[in-house]
């Protein structure tokens, strides 16, 4: 009889733990931050993909950055917060402004020319909670040119990573971090502007700067159990390859420079 009683209490304890874990998960507020500049052709698809998530976001905030098309008009048809922002040219300024607007315990970022798989929020939040992670990303699927289509075949496999190797695979259209680190992330973004100018980079790879600095704070991880699909601005193989080479040149400069900072 005592064995039966012990078994019953063990089952009760296990089920209580599962219930408590689920309750904690439900109380975590998730925010999705969308950055968009003249994305009237894609913003509807982006927002709808977020509204159709298996795990719903508590808030969705769109920063409509210097939009001169119908991006804002389209966005206002949906139950999200749309904030027009007229600021300096460059996506980094929209990211910085967006971080002033979101209030979640977990912040997920996506771009207005992208759309998320239905399990994106669920998988990204689950991944963030593992391995003392502070910044996570997912597979980014390219749509719009042949080079991207070929890259998809390998990126889906090679993007799966943790730690230092994950830094090169965490990209702006799909990343998540803890809300308590929002000010830290915003500060890194602000610093990235000056650092990119200092290194004379052709553009500001703010997502890579973020990953490099955040790996000093905790774990990084990239998963392929979900994805974000991005409509690439480069529509030809030639321009896509040129952009890839540009990213590699910038990344090599940044990585070498960062090593001098952490010595």
Image (cartoon, rainbow, N blue to C red):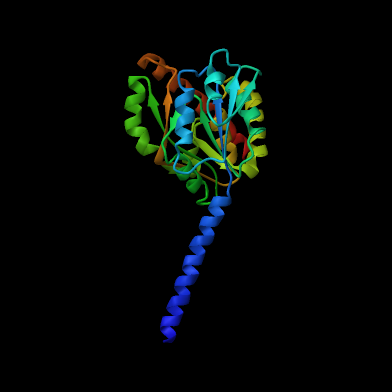
Q: Is residue 183 visible?
A: yes
Q: Quadrant of the C terminus?
A: top right
Q: Is residue 186 above or below residue 180?
A: above
Place residue 181 in its image quadrant.
top right
Task: Name the residue nearer the viewer: 21 or 225.
Answer: 21
Q: Residue at the far top: name it.
A: 68
Q: Is residue 240 above or below residue 133?
A: above
Q: 211 left or right of 159? A: right
Q: Residue at 37% across / 20% down in the picture?
A: 144
Q: Is residue 56 above or below residue 200?
A: below
Q: Is residue 205 visible?
A: no
Place of residue 77 in the rendered image (x, y in percent of width and height, measured from the top left): 53, 25
Q: Residue at 46% across / 74% down in the picture?
A: 10
Place of residue 48 in the rendered image (x, y in percent of width and height, measured from the top left): 46, 30
Q: Is residue 96 above or below residue 233?
A: below
Q: Residue at 54% across / 32% down in the picture?
A: 208
Task: Name the residue nearer the viewer: 205 or 82.
Answer: 82
Q: How many marks?
A: 0
Place of residue 207 in the rendered image (x, y in percent of width and height, measured from the top left): 54, 31
Q: Quadrant of the N terminus?
A: bottom left
Task: Name the residue nearer the viewer: 63 or 82.
Answer: 82
Q: Residue at 54% across / 13% down in the picture?
A: 69
Q: 191 left or right of 134? A: right
């Amino acid at each position: 009889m005592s064995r039966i009683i012990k078994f019953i209490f063990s089952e009760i304890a296990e089920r209580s733990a599962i219930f408590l874990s689920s309750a904690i998960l439900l109380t975590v507020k998730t925010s999705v931050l969308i950055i968009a500049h003249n994305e009237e052709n894609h913003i509807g698809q982006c927002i709808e993909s977020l509204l159709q998530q298996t795990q719903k976001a508590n808030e969705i905030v769109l920063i409509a950055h210097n939009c001169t098309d119908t991006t804002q008009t389209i966005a206002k048809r949906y139950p999200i917060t749309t904030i027009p922002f007229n600021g300096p040219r460059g996506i980094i300024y929209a990211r910085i402004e967006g971080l002033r607007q979101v209030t979640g315990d977990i912040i997920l970022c996506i771009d207005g020319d992208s759309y998320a798989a239905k399990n994106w929020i669920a998988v990204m939040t689950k991944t963030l909670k593992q391995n003392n992670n502070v910044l996570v990303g997912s597979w980014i699927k390219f749509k719009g040119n042949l080079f991207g289509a070929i890259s998809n075949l390998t990126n889906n496999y090679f993007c799966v990573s943790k730690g230092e190797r994950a830094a090169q695979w965490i990209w702006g259209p799909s990343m998540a971090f803890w809300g308590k680190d929002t000010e830290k992330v915003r500060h890194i973004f602000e610093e990235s502007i000056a650092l990119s100018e200092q290194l004379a980079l052709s553009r500001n790879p703010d997502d890579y700067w973020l990953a490099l600095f955040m790996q000093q704070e905790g774990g990084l991880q990239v998963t392929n159990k979900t994805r974000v699909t991005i409509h690439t601005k480069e529509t030809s193989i030639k321009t896509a390859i040129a952009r890839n080479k540009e990213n590699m040149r910038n990344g090599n400069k940044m990585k070498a420079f960062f090593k001098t900072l952490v010595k």
